[in-house]
Image (cartoon, helix red, strand yellow):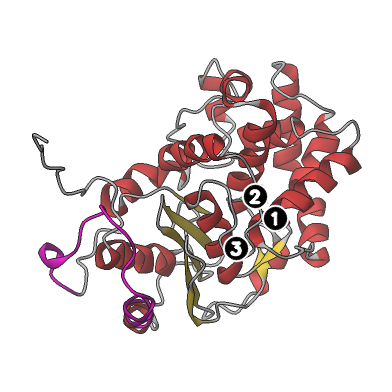
């Protein structure tokens, strides 16, 4: 994250305005892809056995603009399980359905500073769930999904995430079975939360629906379109279909800025300056409000569980495309 960029940062554009032309976006995307193509740092996740078998050299990226343009490179259409990136979009659906005040009260929105599956974070904080981007808060969020049964909740999630992607997303059965057989820690977290009154549905059923949501297959292309939907006030810019209402988007993006990259969220925001969300299968979505989003897939991870090449590519593009939210040009006072 802290390596210098392969160009002079002082030359880069600022966040005010729009994405450059599609031609320029494609050029920057291909340059960044070529630059990091042979990076080999990090390690693939193996605590979910089915994830350990992935080809570590896979690398794909996509940028989707709020105008509906899409640019992609490498393995951008290669499917992988969405894992924790699902937390962003399930939270979006729940925030939209219940209202931002209710999720603030029932889940919380502060960073934990601890790993995504930390039990210590639950013990140390009176809010317990802390935020919807760590496993505790994410499973509690899933437990809040509208629906009387687990199947109703699942149908709501699958349809909702598919609206974000603009196509019907399907579960990777091998990943789902593999995680179901090994997710004792998540089951434990769900029961711990239940004991604290911070689980809002049967804890085992909620864990199962959460595991299914993490097993939905997406591509870097899908992540870019899903992110661009949040950048576009909740309307999928490719299909024109509304996924959620506009006021919910800014709440989701605020939570991503605080907690999207787990205990590295501060490093990410400092270097990249836009909200993002990562997952242990190697996906990252990064959202530039009002402009578009980057989706990237590269399975090798840093110690916190964030794709190494994914972070490097997004940092490069954030600079090149002028996405950093903290780098706007000052507006001029006019007397008329
Ligand atoms: N399904 C995974 C888990 O709950 C997701 C974790 C992640 O992507 N960080 O452990």
Find numbered disc 1 in the image and state the secondary structure of the residue it sits on. Answer: helix
Residue found 69% across the figure and 58% down from its top: 48
Q: Residue 81 versus residue 103: which sits nearer the camera?
A: 103
Residue found 62% across the figure and 32% down from its top: 137
Q: Which of pointers 1 and 2 indicates the residue nearer the eye?
A: 2
- Residue that mark 3 sits on: 281
Query: Residue 179 location, x and y as percent?
Result: 76, 55
- Residue that mark 2 sits on: 242
Write down the region rendered in magenta. Answer: 7-30
Query: Dots 1 and 2: beta carbons under 8 Å?
Result: yes
For the residues labelled 1 and 3, the Cα–Cα distance comes to 22 Å
- Residue that mark 1 sits on: 163
- Quadrant assignment, res 320: bottom left
Earlier sequence position, callout 1 versus callout 2: 1
Find numbered disc 2 in the image and state the secondary structure of the residue it sits on. Answer: loop
Compared to residue 51, the image places residue 259 above or below, namely: above
């Amino acid at each position: 994250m802290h390596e210098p960029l392969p160009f002079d940062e002082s030359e880069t554009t600022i966040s005010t305005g729009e994405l450059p032309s599609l031609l320029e976006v494609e050029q920057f995307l291909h340059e960044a892809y070529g630059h990091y193509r042979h990076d080999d740092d990090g390690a693939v996740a193996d605590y979910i056995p089915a994830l350990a078998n992935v080809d570590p050299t896979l690398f794909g990226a996509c940028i989707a603009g709020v105008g509906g343009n899409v640019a992609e490179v490498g393995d951008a259409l290669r499917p992988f399980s969405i894992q924790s990136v699902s937390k962003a979009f399930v939270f979006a659906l729940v925030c939209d359905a219940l209202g931002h005040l209710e999720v603030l009260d029932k889940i919380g929105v502060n960073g934990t500073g601890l790993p995504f599956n930390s039990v210590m974070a639950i013990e140390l904080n009176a809010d317990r769930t802390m935020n919807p981007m760590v496993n505790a808060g994410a499973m509690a969020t899933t437990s809040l999904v509208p629906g009387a049964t687990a199947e109703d909740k699942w149908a709501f999630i699958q349809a909702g995430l598919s609206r974000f992607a603009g196509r019907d997303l399907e579960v990777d059965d091998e990943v789902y079975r593999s995680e179901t057989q090994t997710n004792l820690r998540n089951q434990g977290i769900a029961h711990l939360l239940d004991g604290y009154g911070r689980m809002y549905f049967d804890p085992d059923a909620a864990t199962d629906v959460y595991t299914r949501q993490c097993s939905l297959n997406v591509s870097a292309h899908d992540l870019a379109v899903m992110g661009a939907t949040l950048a576009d006030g909740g309307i999928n810019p490719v299909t024109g279909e509304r996924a959620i209402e506009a006021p919910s988007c800014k709440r989701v993006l605020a939570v991503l800025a605080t907690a999207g990259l787990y205990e590295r969220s501060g490093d990410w925001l400092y270097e990249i300056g836009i909200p993002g969300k990562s997952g242990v299968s190697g996906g990252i979505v990064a959202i530039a409000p009002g402009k578009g989003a980057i989706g990237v897939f590269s399975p090798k991870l840093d110690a916190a569980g964030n794709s190494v090449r994914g972070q490097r590519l997004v940092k490069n593009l954030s600079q090149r495309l002028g996405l950093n939210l903290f780098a706007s040009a000052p507006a001029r006072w006019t007397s008329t």
